[in-house]
Image (cartoon, grey):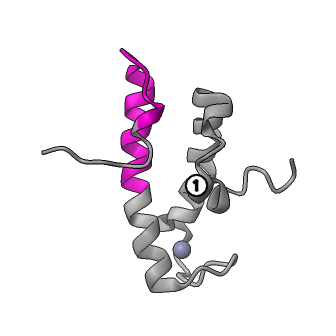
Amino acid sequence: MLVTTPYRYLIGPGDDVGAELVDDLCRWHDRMVAHVRRHGASARCGCGDPDDCPRIEARELWHRARTEFGVDAAPLTFLRQHGGGDVHG
Ligand SMILES: [Zn+2]
């Protein structure tokens, strides 16, 4: 089965680290979409469960994506929006 995701284009040939990160991104993406649907999209998350909140994970993932993909991570607006990476430049 071929799964199309908005993150696949980031993986270069033989890029195992990138492939793993993209797997994490895809899993996170699904969780985040479900989370927003359930708890709303306001900046302060209403889930009340920081241990299991994908918004917390977004910060780490955004940092990893910037480290791994550099400027190629720029189009990941959904992640950036929740990871808050560019808020302070
Ligand atoms: Zn949450």
Q: Position of residue 48 (x, y in %)?
A: 56, 81
Q: Is residue 17 left or right of residue 58?
A: left
Q: Quadrant of residue 8?
A: top left
**In the image, what residue occupies the spot 43% across and 49% down?**
6
The residue drawn where x is 78% and y is 51% is 86
User: Residue, x 44% and y 35% (percent of image)?
Assistant: 9
| Nearer the observer, 52 or 33 | 33
Above or below residue 89? Residue 16 is above
Q: Residue furthest left?
A: 1
Q: Is residue 26 magenta?
A: yes
Quarter of the rendered structure image containing ligand 1: bottom right
Question: Residue 32: horizontal and vertical position, in percent?
Answer: 46, 66
Q: Position of residue 77 (x, y in %)?
A: 62, 55
What SS does tag 1 mark? Answer: helix
Image quadrant of residue 18?
top left
Judged by its main secondary structure, the magenta piece is helix
Q: Dot 1: few (<14), some (14–19), or many (≥20) neighbours within 10 Å?
A: many
Q: Residue 19: give x, y in percent of width and height.
A: 38, 30
Q: Is mark 1 within 8 Å of ligand 1?
A: no
Q: How many marks?
A: 1
Q: Which residue is mark 1?
A: 79
Q: Does residue 32 sit above or below 5 in this rendering?
A: below
Amino acid type for the residue under numbered disc 1: Leu
Residue 20 shown in magenta: yes
Magenta residues span 9-28
Q: Is residue 62 above or below residue 51?
A: above
Q: Residue furthest right?
A: 88
Question: What residue do we see at 57% from left, 64% from top?
Answer: 55
Q: Quadrant of the N terminus?
A: top left
